[in-house]
């Protein structure tokens, strides 16, 4: 699948730079042509001579290759490549990419790149977990870059985290999967996705909500767009960004999401209801901040409108409806009941019992349940889970 592909490999100043040699060998073995671009810090970890010997091409590092006016054109590289892969990619380079700080040849090449960009982070686990790094990675995702999730390890706090660059064979596989001919698979299809939480107001400063980050729904939206679909994303209040080709409708409450989703559904070929919608809301929301005047406060709750049930009722022949079920017990039975009750074509089940998945994580572990079958999947990044879900959806469209 990589035969004849032109790959720009960016290498930054990480101890994992030696793995670039394995990446180059793997890409060339598959028939790809590789041009390396290395940062000045990257040359402290691996020599350009080694890289040049593997690629049979001069390594590009500086804007000017000689003192006679000969210069390297980042614009030409951006036009030449079928893909750019930055592996390893340090926290510093991620920050520069996210904020357009073009102070070396690698970043200027990235900013001129017309082809898809793959990023394989490599850093200390605590650095990877830092909010600034995560914010920069979210920016890169919103620009359409594909993040190859790093491997797990342990933070200084003793908690499990990520940071170590993924293995070369997995990085190459990510490129293979991208070039696998699915890019126009959903062309001409209009797909609606709901994502994130809803907030139900108690008063002007308090609300009832949940821990949903929206990452799963946004990953699904990005995968649908990558495969050529016309995507509408109805998003609750989250801090994520999405690609420009995705039409985004921001909402806050269940009622807002209900109105947007039911309005958009009639125009859709398929809908994926991934949002964690509140089942209850305060019966009466105060118009002023509630003061602490006594030891107890009673808030009466009333049910919200059921979005899945309503769009399931409206579903016409030929439309596909996918739901999500997050369960804590009796998972399969509850999901199958919801599948029938909501008139879904299939339901994606995940469970709070699977540690390190669901809310506020980068990973998920799911089952896809239809009326006749149950498919179980291992723990994966939410990007990979999105691919599995859209593979299943594509079979029905």
Image (tube, rainbow, N blue to C red):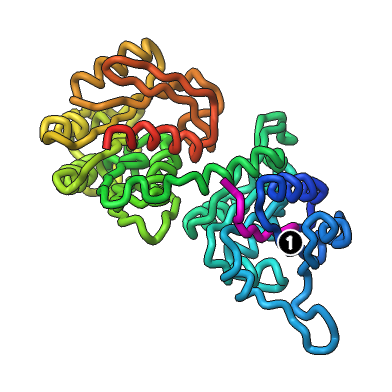
SS for dot 1: strand
Comparing 153 with 373, the one in front is 373
Q: Which residue is drawn at 51% across and 21% down?
A: 354
Q: Give the range drawn in magenta.
A: 1-11
Comparing 311 with 377, the one in front is 377
Q: Where is residue 233 in the image (x, y as percent from the top left)?
A: 31, 49
* 219, above or below 5, in the image: above
Q: Which residue is drawn at 31% across and 25% down?
A: 347
Q: How crowded is mark 1: few (under 14 residues within 10 Å), some or many (20 or more)?
A: many
Q: Which residue is drawn at 74% across and 50% down?
A: 24
Whether residue 127 is visible, yes or no, is no
* 260, above or below 106, in the image: above
* 390, above or below 107, in the image: above
How many numbered circles are shown? 1
Q: Where is residue 245 in the image (x, y as percent from the top left)?
A: 36, 59
Comparing 329 with 321, the one in front is 321
Q: Which residue is drawn at 23% across and 27% down?
A: 344
- Quadrant housing residue 97: bottom right
- Quadrant housing residue 366: top left
Residue 367 is covered by the magenta coloring: no
Q: Is residue 337 left or right of residue 316?
A: right
**Quadrant where the image shows the N terminus:** top right
- Quadrant housing residue 341: top left
- Residue labelled with disc 1: 36
Q: Is residue 336 left or right of residue 374?
A: left
Q: Position of residue 14 (x, y in %)?
A: 79, 52
Q: Is residue 53 left or right of residue 344?
A: right
Q: Report the residue that reaches farthest toward the bottom.
A: 68
Whether residue 72 is visible, yes or no, is yes
């Amino acid at each position: 699948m990589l035969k004849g592909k032109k790959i720009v490999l960016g290498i930054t100043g990480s101890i994992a730079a030696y793995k670039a040699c394995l990446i180059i060998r793997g890409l060339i073995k598959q028939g790809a042509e590789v041009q390396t671009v290395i940062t000045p810090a990257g040359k402290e970890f691996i020599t350009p001579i080694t890289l040049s010997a593997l690629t049979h091409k001069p390594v590009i590092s500086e804007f000017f290759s000689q003192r006679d006016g000969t210069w390297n054109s980042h614009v030409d590289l951006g036009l030449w490549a079928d893909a750019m892969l930055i592996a390893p990619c340090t926290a510093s380079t991620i920050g520069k990419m996210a904020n357009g700080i073009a102070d070396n040849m690698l970043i200027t090449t990235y900013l001129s790149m017309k082809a898809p960009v793959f990023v394989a982070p490599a850093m200390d686990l605590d650095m990877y977990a830092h909010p600034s790094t995560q914010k920069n990675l979210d920016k890169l995702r919103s620009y359409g870059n594909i993040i190859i999730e790093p491997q797990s390890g342990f933070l200084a706090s003793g908690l499990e985290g990520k940071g170590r660059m993924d293995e070369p064979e997995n990085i190459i596989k990510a490129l293979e999967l991208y070039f696998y001919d699915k890019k126009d698979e959903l062309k001409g299809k209009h797909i609606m996705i709901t994502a994130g939480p809803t907030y139900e107001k108690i008063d002007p400063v308090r609300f009832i909500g949940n821990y949903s980050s929206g990452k799963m729904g946004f990953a699904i939206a990005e995968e649908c767009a990558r495969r050529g679909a016309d995507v509408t994303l109805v998003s609750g209040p989250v801090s994520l960004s999405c690609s420009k080709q995705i039409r985004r409708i921001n909402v806050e409450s269940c009622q807002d999401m209900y109105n947007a989703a039911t309005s958009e559904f009639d125009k859709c070929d398929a809908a994926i209801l991934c949002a964690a919608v509140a089942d209850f809301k305060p019966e009466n929301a105060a118009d002023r901040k509630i003061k602490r005047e006594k030891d107890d406060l009673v808030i009466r709750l009333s049910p919200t409108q059921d979005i899945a049930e309503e769009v399931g009722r409206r579903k016409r022949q030929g439309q596909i409806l996918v739901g999500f079920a997050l369960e804590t017990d009796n998972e399969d039975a509850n999901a199958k009941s919801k599948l029938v009750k909501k008139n879904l074509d299939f339901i994606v089940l995940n469970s709070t019992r699977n540690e390190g998945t669901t809310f506020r994580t980068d990973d998920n572990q799911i089952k896809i349940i239809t009326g006749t079958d149950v498919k179980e999947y291992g723990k994966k990044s939410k990007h990979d889970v999105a691919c599995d879900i859209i593979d299943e959806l594509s079979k029905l469209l």
